[in-house]
Amino acid sequence: MQGRFTRLKLENWRNFRTVDVELANRVFVVGPNASGKSNLLDAFRFLQELAVDGGGLTNALEKSNRGGIRSVRSLHAGANPTITIAVSAEIDGSTWRYRLVLEATGSSQKPGPARIVEEIVDRDEENRLHRPNPDDKKDPELLFATALEQRSANAKFRSLRDFLRTVDYIHVIPQLVRAPAQGDSRRFGKGLGTGLIEAMGEVSKRTRDARLNRIQKGLRSVLPQFEKLEWMQDKKGVPHLRAKYNHWRKEGAWQREWAFSDGTLRLIGLLWFLDESGGPLLLEEPEMSLHAAAVRQLPSIVSNVTSRHARQVIMTSHSPDLLADKGVDPSELLILETTGSETTAKSGKAWPKLVDAAKADMPLSMYVEDITRPDEYANLGTFGTRP
C-alpha cells in the first residue's frame, strides 16, 4: 500500500483553533518553543491510534498521555464545544477524506467519555460513511466508538484504516535504545526507540545486513575512526549493536551500544527508520544530538527516502541548519505562529520573502529564523544579571 496525507484540517485541537494546510511529500514544521509543533504531529498519531488493533477512541483519549477530551480541546475554543480532525489522503491512486468531530460528555467535575458528533468517510467524492446514521439514532451508545476502529463498520473503507495504521512516529531517545524492550512497548509504533535493536533482529539477515551496510557507509563520513557496524547476539541471546573503530591495536577496538554516544545512537536509529518502506513517517526534532554538518545533510537523506520508498516524511525542527539546504521549497514548510488567542499554521508560500529567496536559489534558514523568533527572545540573555 502506498499513500500520503495531502491536507490537514483541525478545529479546537490543543493550541490550534483553526488549521487548514496542504501537505507535501516532505514537510518541515517550524516555530518557536511551545508553539505546538508536537501537537500538530499528535493529530496524525491520534488517527493512527484510532485505527490500530487495541486502540480506539477511548484508548486514544483516556489511556494515552492526552488526558481526555477536555484536555485536548483548545483553551481558545470559546463557545464551540467540539473538536474536529479531518485529513485528505492519496491511497493507491484514490483520494480519501476522513472527518471526525467530537464533543465532551459529563461535567468538568465528573467528565464522561468523548461522543462522536460527526464521522464522515469519502472516497473519490463518493460517500462511504456518514454518522450519525440510523443505527446510531436507534442506539446512541454507538456514538462512543468510531466506525474506523470497528471491523463490522469499516468494511467499505478498510484501505483508509490500513493506511492510517502505517503511520509511524519516531523520536529516538538514546537511553531507551540502550534498554531492552519490555512487553508491548512497540504496539503503537517504534516511537521513542525502545526495542530498536530487537526490531533489527526481526527482519531477515539479508535485509538487516543491507540496511546496516548503508548506515555503516553513512557513519564513516561523520564518525572519526569508525570502521564497521554489526548486529549480534550475546551468549544469552540478547541482541546488541557493536561498532569497530580503528585503534592503535592492529585488530582495532569494538564497542557495544551502551558505549555509543547519544548522537551516534540517534543517527543510527534515524537512518534505520528512514530506510524502511511504509506509510507517513513523523519525525520529532531529528537534529537533536547531531553535529550541524550532519543536520545539513538530513533534507537530502529525507528526499532520497521519499523518492526511493515513496514515503511521506513530516518532521518538526528548531534547527536553522536543517533548512540550509537550497533544495527546501517554501511549499514544504509549515510555519507556526503564536498569538494571544491561538497558534496558526501557514505554508511557507504565504511569506513572499521565502518565495523570493527560493527563486534566487538562496537557503530559507535565515528568513525562517526571523519569522519564528519571538520578539522578546533576546531578553533570555539577561538571565543571571542583577535586577
Image (cartoon, rainbow, N blue to C red):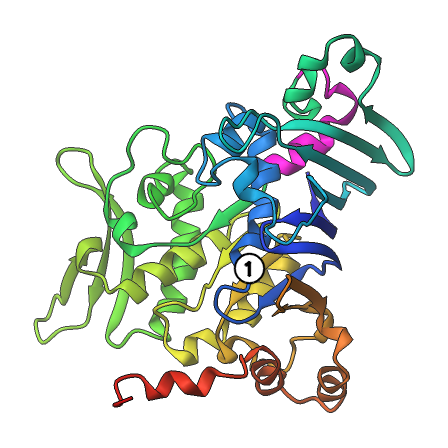
Is residue 310 highlighted in magenta? no
Asked whether 262 or 205 is in front, the reply is 262
Categorize mark 1 by other alpha carbons within 10 Å: few (<14), some (14-19), many (20+): many
**Vertical relation: 258 (above or below) 91:** below
Given the current orientation, which residue lies at the most extreme left position?
249
- Find residue 67 and report its horizontal and vertical position in percent: 47, 38
**Quarter of the figure that contains the C terminus:** bottom left
Q: Identify the residue shown where x is 58% and y is 25%.
A: 106
Q: Is residue 278 visible?
A: no
Q: Which segment is the magenta one?
A: 151-166
Given the current orientation, which residue lies at the most extreme right position?
125
Determine the main secondary structure of the stretch shown in magenta: helix
Residue that carries the numbered disc 1 in the rendered image? 36
- Find residue 152 and report its horizontal and vertical position in percent: 70, 13
**Vertical relation: 118 (above or below) 329:** above
- Give the amino acid type for the residue marked by disc 1 in the picture: Gly
**Quarter of the image where one finds residue 369:** bottom right
Q: Identify the residue shown where x is 25% and y is 53%.
A: 175
Asked whether 288 or 38 is in front, the reply is 38
Asked whether 294 or 189 is in front, the reply is 189
